[in-house]
Image (cartoon, rainbow, N blue to C red):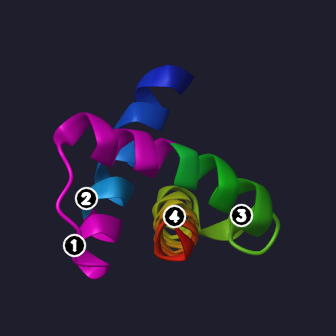
């Protein structure tokens, strides 16, 4: 069940993050960004947003995905 939860949250977070950052990505990349963002955001915001449950997970995942996209764009701009 945990893996299914991560994929669903990752898909939602990746979709929201790619729309907020206005990048065009295929569905697999979108889910991957969202899953990585969910892990990153979940670790950072675990204690702060624990009382919000699923909503907190989505918020943390979107914020984590936004940080990953920002970092990727900054790295890509240097090349």
* Numbered mark located on residue 72 in the image: 4
In the rendered image, the vertical position of residue 67 relative to residue 13, given as above or below: below
Closer to viewer: mark 2 or mark 3: 2
Q: Quadrant of residue 49?
A: bottom right
Secondary element at tag 1: helix
C-alpha separation, residue under disc 4 versus residue under disc 3: 28 Å
**Where is residue 18 shown, x and y percent of the image?**
28, 66
Secondary element at tag 4: helix
In the rendered image, the vertical position of residue 13 relative to residue 36, given as above or below: below
Q: Which residues are magenta?
A: 16-35
Q: Quadrant of residue 67?
A: bottom right
Label 1: few (<14), some (14–19) or many (≥20) C-alpha neighbours in 10 Å: few
Q: Earlier in the sequence, mark 4 or mark 1?
A: 1
Closer to viewer: mark 4 or mark 1: 4
Q: Residue at x 68, y 55 (%)?
A: 40
Q: Which residue is mark 1?
A: 19
C-alpha separation, residue under disc 1 versus residue under disc 3: 25 Å
Q: Residue at x 17, y 43 (%)?
A: 26
Q: Which residue is mark 3?
A: 50
C-alpha separation, residue under disc 2 versus residue under disc 1: 6 Å
C-alpha separation, residue under disc 2 versus residue under disc 4: 16 Å
Q: Nearer the viewer, residue 20 or 6?
A: 20
In the picture, measured across the screen, residue 66 lies left or right of residue 22, that is right
C-alpha separation, residue under disc 4 versus residue under disc 1: 15 Å
**Where is residue 63 shown, x and y percent of the image?**
53, 72
In the picture, measured across the screen, residue 19 lies left or right of residue 53, that is left
In the rendered image, the vertical position of residue 46 relative to residue 29, given as above or below: below
Closer to viewer: mark 4 or mark 3: 4
Magenta part, dominant SS: helix
In the picture, measured across the screen, residue 45 lies left or right of residue 66, that is right
Tell me, yes or no, whether the two marked residues, 2 and 1, touch with CB atoms within 8 Å: yes
Q: Which residue is mark 2?
A: 15
């Amino acid at each position: 069940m945990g893996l299914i939860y991560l994929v669903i949250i990752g898909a939602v977070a990746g979709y929201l993050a790619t729309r907020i950052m206005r990048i065009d990505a295929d569905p697999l990349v979108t889910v991957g960004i969202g899953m990585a963002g969910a892990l990153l955001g979940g670790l950072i915001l675990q204690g702060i947003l624990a009382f919000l449950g699923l909503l907190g997970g989505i918020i943390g995942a979107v914020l984590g995905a936004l940080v990953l996209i920002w970092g990727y764009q900054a790295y890509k701009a240097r090349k």
